[in-house]
Each structure stands twice: as C-alpha cells, then as structure tokens.
Amino acid sequence: MLSLIPERIAPAVSLASHLGRGLGRIGTDTLIGRLRPLPRTIGDLDAATVSSLIGRTVTSVALIGGDAGTSSRARLALTGEDVPDSVFVKMAAETVATRLMGELGNLADTETRFYRQLSPELTGVPHCYGSGFDAVTGRFVLILEDLAAGPCEFPDTLHPIDADRA
C-alpha cells in the first residue's frame, strides 16, 4: 500500500511544478512584461520590432487580419528592404487562462525551438523569418511564411476538405 503513494504523488508534484512555473511566468509578465524585449500584443509589432526579429529593414507594418486561440495570430503586410509582402505571426495568448494552458504544455518554448532548430531541415513547413522566446515571462513571437498568401486552403469544421483533396 505504501508503495502506491510515490506513484500517486509524483504526477501531482509534476503538475504542481508546471502550474507554478506557468503562474510565475504570467505573474512576472504582469509586473515587468513591458520592460522585457518581446512585444506583448499583435498591436505592439511595429516596423522596428519586426525588423529586429527578422534581421531585415521593415519600413511599415499593417494588420491584414487576426484571431486568437491557444495563441494570438495575425497576418501582417510588410514593406521594406528585401522583406516578404506579408507574414503570419504567432504570439502568446492574451488571456491568462489560455496562457496557463499553453504553459502546462510548454508550447511557446517548444514551438519556438522547433522553428529555430528543426524546421530548416524539413520540407513542407512554413519558413520562419524570425522568432523570440522570453523564458522569464513565457512570451514568444514567431514570424512565419504567410501560407494564406499562396494557393493553400485552410478547411475547418464549417468548410471541410473533401476526401479527394485530403
């Protein structure tokens, strides 16, 4: 009977650790997030910030459209020197509950590392123009190839793809 206690405690301790880390990052972001280098919202992505993230001179940034889910997402139109006409941006979610859910899965760090380290070796993955992850606040930014600017389709539950095109 006593041998079952460690088996039951370990998962609870692990979950508590994840929750604590996530709450700590979100709390730190609330207190000092504006002092950290990464933008906090899509609206904070100005030409200077995008230039810094992609390593190219961007002269203007305009919002094409966006939505939110496990992250804040937007399409941005860019002008500048050797920059794409548009990009797709993913950032930390704006709501605390959604951010905490992402923290439980360590989504921001994992996705940022995927695009930095693994995606250049793969085909069929959107090109990453630039990214950033702040381990102190849990904030991240991914600036990706805008697949919606090309021939890609994005089916959903209201507009599903048929079996022949799947």
Image: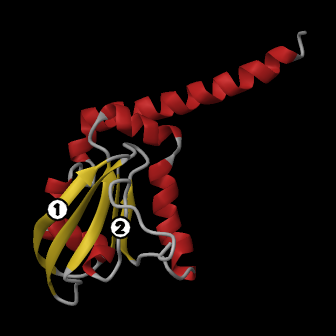
Residue 65 numbered mark, or none? 1
Task: Residue at 31% x, 54% y: name it.
Answer: 91
> Which residue is tagged 2?
154
Q: CA distance from mark 2 to mark 1?
A: 15 Å
Residue 130 numbered mark, or none? none
Please report whichever mark, 2 or 1, sits nearer to the chain's N-terminal start: 1
Q: Could you tell whether 36 is left or right of 117 in the image?
A: left
Q: Could you tell whether 140 is left or right of 116 in the image?
A: left
Circle 1: element type: strand
Q: Position of residue 11 (x, y in %)?
A: 69, 27
* Quarter of the picture holding the N terminus: top right
Q: Position of residue 47 (x, y in %)?
A: 13, 70
Give the crowd class for mark 2: few <14, some 14-19, many >=20 residues within 10 Å: few
Q: Amino acid at mark 1?
A: Gly
Q: Is residue 127 above or below residue 82?
A: above
Residue 126 image-quadrant placement: bottom left
Residue 148 image-quadrant placement: bottom left
> Mark 1 and mark 2 in contact (Cβ < 8 Å)?
no
Task: Residue at 73% x, 25% y: name it.
Answer: 10
Q: Amino acid at mark 2?
A: Phe
Mark yes or no: residue 25 visible: no
Q: Nearer the viewer, residue 15 or 20?
A: 15
Task: Residue at 31% x, 45% y: name it.
Answer: 93
Q: Position of residue 38 (x, y in %)?
A: 28, 55
